[in-house]
């Protein structure tokens, strides 16, 4: 069955098809978000085990094919820059190309529902302004749509989410972790994204956003708590 891809996403999706069938489009997407997330994380907070995972992933591709991953970064930057509000770009592409994990029985919250939930959760703006900061948690974050919706709602209410909110995300799927982390990076959201099962408090990998590291949110959270 042919899937409709919006015009704005066509360039990005076409870049995912650079191998003309040599690699499956969903595998290229997964490898792209994994390597991009590791590149961001290790630039600000280096982990050798993450670097090893990056090198293990890039080895699948010939050197002449590496250029397409840089082009995907450029295209993603354009997509996010062209949005009028904070948008779950990677989650939408993920769904369109059929990259859902059947093993993990993934189901992503639709954007319109995520926005409605964000409005309900935030409540009175005046109450928020009285607080030093708030924490926003999602124990099954998917592509991060709920957290992005909260940031979008705060932004629409003229509340600086970059200084007023700490976002904590978790998912058992590493690719979901990477999608959430990348988008939090683009929107300068201070937060932590954890790979692991929330039900058993599992932590396999932890990604810290540059905003979290540079603004010393670890100290701020301890003081605020």
Image (spheres, helix red, strand yellow):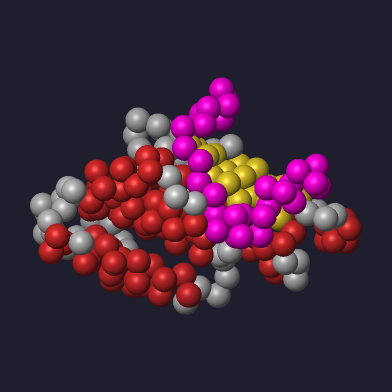
* x and y percentages locating residue 177 in the rendered image: 46, 45
* Residue at x 33% of width, y 52% of height: 35
Q: Which residue is more in the foreground, 149 or 7?
A: 149
In the image, what residue occupies the spot 21% across and 67% down?
67
Could one spot residue 104 in this view of the protein? Answer: yes
Image coordinates of residue 62 in percent, x first then y, are 12, 56
Q: Position of residue 112 (x, y in %)?
A: 58, 56
Q: Nearer the viewer, residue 108 or 183?
A: 183
Q: Is residue 24 left or right of residue 88?
A: left
Q: Which of the 4 image quadrants contains residue 162?
A: bottom right
Tell me, yes or no, whether the highlighted magenta stretch contains residue 40.
no
**Residue 225 left/right relative to 199:** right
Which corner quadrant holds the C terminus? top right
Residue 217 magenta: yes
Residue 202: percent from left, percent from top: 53, 27
How many marks do you count on the picture?
A: 0
Query: Is any part of residue 111 visible from this angle?
Result: no
Rendered residue at 76%/43% (across/down):
222
- In the visual, does 60 lie left or right of 213? left
Going 67% across and 55% down the picture, which residue do you hit?
Answer: 216
Q: Which residues are magenta?
A: 196-225
Q: Quadrant of residue 199?
A: top right
Q: Is residue 92 above or below residue 105?
A: below
Q: Is residue 88 above or below residue 194?
A: below
């Amino acid at each position: 069955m042919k899937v409709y891809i919006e015009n704005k996403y066509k360039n990005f999706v076409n870049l995912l098809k650079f191998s003309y069938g040599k690699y499956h489009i969903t595998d290229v997407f997964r490898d792209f978000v994994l390597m991009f997330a590791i590149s961001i994380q290790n630039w600000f907070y280096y982990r050798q085990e993450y670097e090893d995972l990056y090198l293990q992933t890039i080895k699948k591709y010939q050197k002449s094919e590496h250029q397409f991953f840089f082009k995907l970064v450029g295209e993603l930057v354009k997509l996010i820059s062209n949005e009028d509000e904070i948008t779950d770009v990677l989650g939408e592409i993920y769904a369109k190309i059929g990259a859902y994990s059947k093993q993990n029985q993934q189901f992503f919250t639709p954007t319109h529902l995520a926005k409605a939930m964000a409005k309900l959760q935030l409540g009175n703006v005046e109450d928020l302004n009285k607080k030093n900061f708030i924490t926003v948690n999602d124990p099954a974050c998917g592509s991060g749509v709920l957290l992005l919706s909260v940031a979008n709602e705060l932004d629409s209410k003229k509340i600086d989410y970059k200084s007023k909110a700490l976002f904590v995300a978790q998912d058992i799927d590493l690719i979901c972790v990477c999608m959430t982390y990348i988008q939090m990076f683009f929107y300068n959201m201070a937060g932590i994204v954890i790979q692991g099962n929330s039900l058993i408090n599992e932590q396999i990998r932890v990604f810290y956003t540059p905003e979290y590291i540079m603004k010393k949110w670890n100290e701020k959270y301890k003081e605020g708590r």
